[in-house]
Image (spheres, helix red, strand yellow):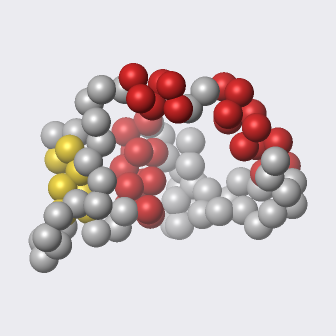
């Protein structure tokens, strides 16, 4: 789960995904599992695919392990307040 700016933690996967979208794609919103532009925006920057095969090939346990192990352990935490050394 992730810590929100108000100090409260997300309680479900859906809340966590929504929080990540709000933080990283503030100009977009999720509607019926599609990322759509906010009012005034011409188009969404990213539309998630319903085909997860590419993600499954790209995000592997080995790549996640490599990413975590190559982080500086005392790097500043992100908005989730998690230090890499905790991972």
Residue 72 locus on image (x, y percent): 85, 57
Residue 68 vs 58, above or below: the answer is below
- Numbered circles on residues, count: 0
On the rendered image, what quadrant is the C terminus found in?
top right
The residue positioned 72% from the left and 43% from the top of the image is 67
> Which residue is nearer to you in this view: 19 or 51?
51
Q: Splitting the image into 4 quarters, where does residue 40 fall?
A: bottom left
The residue positioned 36% from the left and 50% from the top of the image is 18
Residue 14 locus on image (x, y percent): 37, 39
The residue positioned 76% from the left and 43% from the top of the image is 68
> Which residue is nearer to you in this view: 14 or 57?
57
On the rendered image, what quadrant is the N terminus found in?
top right
The residue positioned 56% from the left and 32% from the top of the image is 59
Residue 64 locus on image (x, y percent): 67, 35
Res. 66 in view: yes
Residue 81 vs 16, above or below: the answer is below
Residue 40 vs 72, above or below: the answer is below
Residue 26 locus on image (x, y percent): 34, 67
Res. 87 in view: no
Q: Splitting the image into 4 quarters, where does residue 79 fall?
A: bottom right
Please indicate whether residue 32 sits to the left or right of residue 19 in the image. left
């Amino acid at each position: 789960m992730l810590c929100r700016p108000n100090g409260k933690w997300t309680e479900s996967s859906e809340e966590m995904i929504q929080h990540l979208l709000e933080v990283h794609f503030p100009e977009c919103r999720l509607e019926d599992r599609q990322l759509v532009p906010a009012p005034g925006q011409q188009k969404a920057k990213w539309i998630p695919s319903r085909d997860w095969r590419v993600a499954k090939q790209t995000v592997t346990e080995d790549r996640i392990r490599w990413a975590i192990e190559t982080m500086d352990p005392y790097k500043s935490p992100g908005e989730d307040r998690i230090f890499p050394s905790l991972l």
